[in-house]
Image (tube, rainbow, N blue to C red):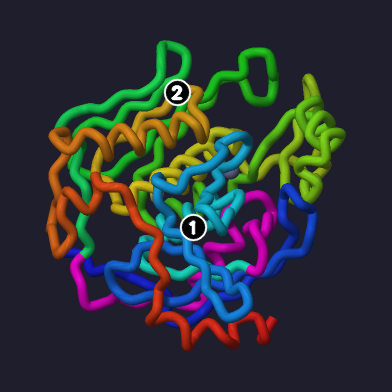
Amino acid sequence: MRKQQTLSKSAFFNGIGLHSGNPVSMAVHPAPVHTGIVFVRQVGEHILSLPASIDFLGNTDHCTTLESEDFRVQTVEHILAALAGLEVDNAYVELEGQEIPAADGSAGMFVETIQQTGIVQQEAIRTHLKIIESITVGDHQRSITVSPSPLPKISYFIDFPNHPLIQHQEFVHNCTPLDFHKQVAPARTFAFRKEVEYLWSHGLGLGGSLQNTVVFSDTDLVNEDGLRFPDECVRHKVLDLIGDLTLLGIPVIGHFEAKCSGHWLHAELVKSIKNQPEKWILFNPGPQTKSDITTVAKQQAPASFLPDLQPAFQTL
Ligand SMILES: [Zn+2]
């Protein structure tokens, strides 16, 4: 039986927000067992919190956004993927503003720093959600299915037949931390030049650059330093899916097969799993019950965290 994990101490990150273009700081702190991943922000004397839960899903255009009445966080998928890929169950992700640092457009920097900081086991068993009957969302063009499997696995397929450098790509990920670190985390966000020019002309993606995005022209690659993997695009889709799946709040044992999918469809699958408890069981259940997963999450202030939050950004 696997135990829950958190960071051994806080990890700190600086960078540019992909959409605002403004400098942003982030700290990932250890959290007690059964916390899950919770975004927190200090506003004066108050601490705002926002659990990484599908119940707080906002816009899924170009990135995944979480929002509540008073707290909004954009581009959560890469830090969530880094935490899930390294099997970190519990963490507080503290932000100064509304965005996660863009880093190099991948989860590589988050993974390296979290690993250097250290991951520790905690005194509680990790509960998994085990799929016992297949669930599919989408249509014949774009779809995602999760079906029963003895181990977690992701197969992703994308199809850009008109682009000579992308075309058809398929990648299978066996969901181990080592594979994630080496094969998935370094894959960067990609976009097409026309799309990027449109976004920039509309005041969006202002922090985007060739330092954090792989940009394709109609027939070629704009970045001079080339691709990190010939199939970097599909690997990045796997990264995004791992991040988006964390919004279920519990790791899943099943085989995910995605075809030309994206953030919106990833989120639809999470909702579908949540809404169909007859198609899964809890494996190694602890205090968490099925209804904890199927009921709507409530925003909760992590009171035990308050004393630790004060010095977070003074060290940056
Ligand atoms: Zn992404």
Picture quadrant where residue 54 is located: top left
Residue 303, disc: none
Amino acid type, residue under disc 2 in the picture? Lys
Amino acid type, residue under disc 1 in the picture? Ala
Q: Residue at x 36, y 23 (%)?
A: 137
**Is residue 300 toward the left or the right of residue 294 in the image?**
right
Residue 119 visible here? no
Q: Residue at x 35, y 44 (%)?
A: 174
Q: Mark 1 = which residue?
A: 82
> What segment carries the magenta color?
96-125
Frontmost residue, 108 versus 262: 262
Counting from the top left corner in percent of width and height, residue 111 is at: 53, 63
> CB of residue at label 2: within 8 Å of ligand 1?
no
Frontmost residue, 286 versus 193: 286
- As measured in the structure, the alpha-carbon distance from the residue carrying label 2 to the one carrying label 1 is 22 Å
**Is residue 28 toward the left or the right of residue 52 in the image?**
right
Q: Quadrant of ligand 1?
A: top right
Quarter of the image that includes the C terminus? bottom right
Answer whether residue 100 is magenta in the image.
yes
Q: Residue at x 25, y 39 (%)?
A: 254
Q: Residue at x 50, y 78 (%)?
A: 117
Quarter of the image that includes the N terminus? bottom left
Element type where label 2 sits in the image: strand
- Density class for disc 2 (Cα within 10 Å; few <14, some 14-19, many ≥20) is many
Q: Mark 2 = which residue?
A: 259
Counting from the top left corner in percent of width and height, residue 186 is at: 59, 51
Answer whether residue 314 is magenta in the image.
no
